[in-house]
C-alpha cells in the first residue's frame, strides 16, 4: 500500500475530540462509528464482539504479540484518546469499548434537550459581517445545525 493511500485513510478516519458538554456529540458519534467500522471493529462498540485479551497478560505465558491483537488494542483505544479527561474519569472503570460507548450515548441523550436549546440560541446569534464571506458563514450555520 502506498504512503499516499495510508495518509488519505488516516485523514478520513480521524475522529475529533468530544467536547465535555456534548455540543459535538452527534458529529463525534458518527465519525467514531465510521472510523471504527472502516477498521473492522464496529462489533466492539455494538457489544457483539468479545473484549480483546490484554496483550500484557499474554506475554508472560509465552504467547506472541500478534498484529491482530496490536491493531485491536490500538483501534479500540481511539475512544479514550478523543474524550476529555472529565469524561474519561467517568468511564475509566468500564470494561469494554461497547460499555463505554453505551455510557456516553446515554449520557448525551439525556443532555440532548439542553444542548439543542443552547445550539438553537447559538444559531440564532450568528451573523455574517457586512464584508464577511457568505459561504463560510453558511458553512458555519450548517455545522451548528447538524
Image (spheres, rainbow, N blue to C red):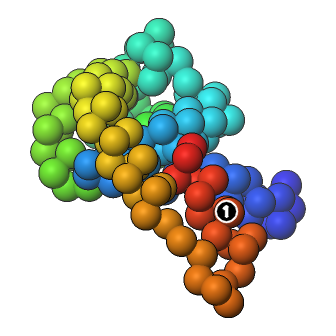
Q: Position of residue 9 (x, y in %)?
A: 73, 54
Looking at the picture, tell me which residue is in the foreground, 135 or 42.
135
> Which residue is drawn at the image coordinates 57% and 44% (left, top)?
146
Q: Is residue 100 in view?
A: no
* Secondary structure at numbered mark 1: helix
Residue 85 to residue 111: above or below: below
Q: Quadrant of the N terminus?
A: bottom right
Image location of residue 136, percent across then percent down: 68, 72
Q: Which residue is mark 1?
A: 139
Residue 6 to residue 79: above or below = below
Residue 133 showing in the rendered view: yes
In the picture as drawn, the residue positioned furthest to the front comes out as 130
Would you say 52 lies left or right of 21 here?
right
Taking the spot 83% from the left edge, 59% from the top edge, the residue there is 5
Toward the bottom, the furthest residue is 131
Nearer the observer, 132 or 27: 132
Task: Please state if 115 lies on the left or on the right of 36 as rendered.
Answer: left
Amino acid at each position: 500500500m502506498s504512503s499516499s493511500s495510508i495518509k488519505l485513510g488516516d485523514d478520513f478516519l480521524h475522529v475529533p475530540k468530544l467536547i465535555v458538554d456534548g455540543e459535538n456529540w452527534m458529529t463525534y458519534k458518527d465519525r467514531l462509528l465510521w472510523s471504527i467500522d472502516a477498521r473492522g471493529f464496529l462489533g466492539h462498540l455494538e457489544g457483539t464482539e468479545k473484549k480483546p485479551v490484554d496483550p500484557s497478560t499474554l506475554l508472560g505465558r509465552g504467547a506472541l504479540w500478534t498484529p491482530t491483537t496490536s491493531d485491536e488494542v490500538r483501534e479500540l483505544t481511539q475512544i479514550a484518546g478523543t474524550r476529555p479527561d472529565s469524561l474519561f474519569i467517568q468511564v475509566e472503570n468500564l470494561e469494554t469499548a461497547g460499555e463505554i460507548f453505551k455510557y456516553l450515548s446515554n449520557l448525551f441523550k439525556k443532555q440532548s434537550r439542553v444542548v439543542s436549546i443552547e445550539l438553537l440560541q447559538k444559531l440564532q446569534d450568528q451573523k455574517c459581517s457586512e464584508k464577511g464571506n457568505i459561504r463560510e458563514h453558511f458553512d458555519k450555520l450548517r455545522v451548528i445545525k447538524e
